[in-house]
Amino acid sequence: MIFGLPVKGTHAHSYVMSHMSLSDLNSTLIKKSNSNETIEFLNLVLEKRRILGYEGNTNEGELAAFISYAQAFPNGFVALVDTYDTLISGVPNFLSVGWALFEIGYSPVGIRLDSGDLAYLSVETRKLFKRADEIIIQTGQCQTNIFTQCTIIASNDLNEEVIISLQQTANEIDVYGK
C-alpha cells in the first residue's frame, strides 16, 4: 500500500478459524458499490443462503469469516473454501456472500482450494457455481450468470510435477498459486 500497489489475494485458514459464529462480526453492514448507502449485509447474506438451500448446513464461523473478508475487500472477494468441508460449507458460504455482494454492485472474484483432491474439488465447485446461477435466474432476482465465470484457484505448495499431473486430469482450475 505504501508504494501504491493493489492488495490482492485471499485469507488464511487461521483467519477462517478465528471466527466461531456470526456473533464474531464487528459489523453487519456494508456500503453499496459507488454509493454511501449502507446495507444490512448479514441479513442479505442469510437470505441468499436460504434461497440457495444452504440454510443450517454450513459452518457459521466460516460464513462470518467470509462476510468479514467481503466487507474489507468487496471488490476482490476470493474465499479460501476448504478450511472445513469444501463442498458442504465452503463453496455454499462463498455463493451466499458472493450473491449478496453482487446484489449491491460488487462482483465476487472466486475461490481458492488449498487441500484435498484439487481436480475433483474444482469440478464439483464449478457444478455448484452453475447450479447457483440456475437457481438465481429461476428466482427472477437476476438475469445474468454471477458465478459461472468466477475463478477457481488451486494452491498448496504446487510444483511443476503436480501442475502437470493436474493438467492431465479433468479439472476446472483457472489459476495455480503457491
Image (cartoon, rainbow, N blue to C red):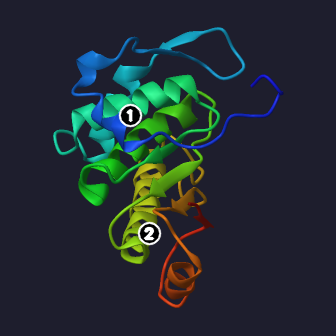
Residue drawn at point x = 46 percent, y = 45 percent: 79
Residue at the extreme bottom of the image, as rendered:
168
Q: Which label sits on residue 122?
A: 2
The percent coordinates of residue 40 (x first, y second) are 43, 14
Q: Which label sits on residue 35?
A: none
* Relative depth, front residue between 1 and 27: 1
The kind of residue on which mark 2 rests is Ser
Q: Residues within 10 Å of mark 2 (few under 14, many from 20)?
A: many
The percent coordinates of residue 102 (x first, y second) are 56, 36
Q: Residues within 10 Å of mark 1 (few under 14, many from 20)?
A: some
Mark 1 lies on a secondary structure that is: helix
Residue drawn at point x = 27 percent, y = 38 percent: 50
* Relative depth, front residue between 114 and 68: 114
Displayed quadrant of residue 56: top left
Please indicate, yes or no, whether residue 48 appears anywhere in the rendered image: no
* Relative depth, front residue between 29 and 15: 15
Q: Report whether 114 appears left or right of 51.
A: right
Residue drawn at point x = 43 percent, y = 52 percent: 138
* Relative depth, front residue between 31 and 14: 14
Q: Report whether 143 appears left or right of 86.
A: right
The kind of residue on which mark 1 rests is Tyr
Q: Contact, CB < 8 Å: mark 2 with mark 1?
A: no
Classify 176 as above or below 24: below
Give the residue pinned by disc 1.
15
Mark 2 lies on a secondary structure that is: helix
Classify 172 as above or below 168: above
- Report the Cα–Cα distance between label 2 and label 1: 22 Å
Q: Report whether 150 appears left or right of 51.
A: right
